[in-house]
Image (cartoon, rainbow, N blue to C red):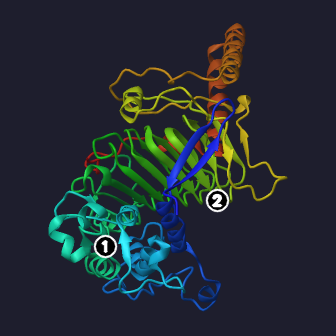
Amino acid sequence: MTDRLKFGFGFHRFLVLSVDTLQFLLFLYIQQLNKVSLRTSLIGEEWPSPRNRSQSPDLTEKSNCHNKNWNDYSHQAFVYDHLSDLLELLLDPKQLTASFHSTHSSLVSREAVVALSFLVEGTISRARKIYPLHELALWQPLHADSGFSKISKTFSFYKLETWLRSCLTGNPFGTSACLKSGKKLAWAHQVEGTTKRAKIACNTHVAPRMHRLVVMSQVYKQTLAKSSDTLVGAHVKIHRCNESFIYLLSPLRSVTIEKCRNSIFVLGPVGTTLHLHGCDNVKVIAVCHRLSISSTTGCIFHILTPTRPLILSGNQTVTFAPFHTHYPMLEDHMARTGLATVPNYWDNPMVVCRENSNTRVFQLLPPCEFYVFIIPFEMEGDTTEIPGGLPSVYQKALGQREQKIQIWQKTVKEAHLTKDQRKQFQVLVENKFYEWLINTGHRQQLDSLVPPAAGSKQAAG
């Protein structure tokens, strides 16, 4: 088996991209984690209330999280129950029997253990520093346990599996652990009576830099805003938020938004991937290295990105638009995450999975529907305009709308209304504006910006 799979493409030059073959095999195998059995679904053993059928010790009844992507205990149980298969998948074919199984004398290569580090990492004596699996397995004091032979430069399959099973534990910096024992966060502008089910927590006070995590779940009818060290470089996971307006104005490592509805998310620069799944009627405003979406309906993305957005399976009525806002620290945060204004492929998405060739999955926002977005919070910083500006067609639409406003103001001024007429006219305009706020849903957004009463909880961290 070759060490790497290679893919080539290009017009005037040939660019080679590659992935580690063994890691790619592991990646494909672990997709079974989310496999739903129709049989077990019918008899109630799996969806929609999955039960942990693991044979691994101490893993049953540990989690009340039904989202497998978030459930670290399910991840641990899956690896534990399928460890033999995972190791056999990485074996050289010569180490397998005729029925493609390992034997007691099978040997595992160093390259295979390096690949397994894609899934497993750990610590020494519960220290804070995290090491990839192969560094621990190759550490001299652990050779007897991991089964490494200096002579053959390989691992004993039996000893390696036994050692892994004895040491395997849940991710102390994962989502489940964060929700269970992480630091609970209080936020500004919380509306009384709507936060009972909300879960907002972080592990940034205990986790290593690359494992910093902020989790937000079941936020309902809230405006939440934060720009602080708690968010800097953190992985952010947002789940089941509804009718909310969330501003995370700090440089972020990655962001995952799942099963959210009728909400607006304004994000600081995302250094790696921004991924949405299972969302309806959501607007996302962000600068990000990569955007990917799956199973979304009626979502709008105002983005600035140096890579083509990936449209995966199950999407309907997706709209892309240029990034259209700014806040004072934005350009500084972009520099910290290594993001610039060019190139910008917001309008050139790649449809990776197309279920129906006759259906257009996405559209670009018509310029006549384009407005800039104003972030309603005061901050210190040097950014005073949208980084990179706007595409000319959208800038022209804004200019035409501004001209109409000026013509309207001139018409009103030249009407020479009396004082009573001006007052009556003002009432009519305000009533129409109020109706528009209600019909568009902007009334809730404005009301949620009213500062909380004295003594209420403010944003912490």
Depth check, front residue: 180 or 441: 180
Q: Residue at x 46, y 61 (%)?
A: 23
Assess disc 2: are there few (<14), some (14-19) or many (≥20) residues with their C-alpha within 10 Å of its C-alpha.
Answer: some
Q: State the image coordinates of residue 34 (x, y, percent, origin top left).
A: 54, 72
Q: State the image coordinates of residue 225 (x, y, percent, origin top left).
A: 39, 43
Secondary structure of the residue carrying tag 2 is: loop
In terms of image quadrants, where is residue 347? top right
Assess disc 1: are there few (<14), some (14-19) or many (≥20) residues with their C-alpha within 10 Å of its C-alpha.
Answer: many
Depth check, front residue: 215 or 336: 336
Cα separation, mark 1 vs mark 2, equals: 42 Å
View extreme (right): residue: 358
The dot on residue 155 is 1
| Amino acid type, label 1 | Phe
Q: Is residue 179 shown left or right of residue 46?
A: left
Answer yes or no: is residue 351 visible. Answer: yes
Q: State the image coordinates of residue 173 (x, y, percent, origin top left).
A: 30, 62
Nearest-to-viewer mark from 1 and 2:
1
Q: In terms of sequence position, does the residue under pointer 1 or pointer 2 come before the other?
A: 1
Secondary structure of the residue carrying tag 1 is: strand
**Residue 185 position (above or below residue 8):** below
View extreme (bottom): residue: 43
Q: State the image coordinates of residue 420 (x, y, percent, origin top left).
A: 64, 19
Depth check, front residue: 84 or 213: 84
Q: How many marks?
A: 2
Depth check, front residue: 140 or 405: 140
The dot on residue 295 is 2
Q: Is residue 298 shown left or right of residue 389?
A: right
| Amino acid type, label 2 | Ser
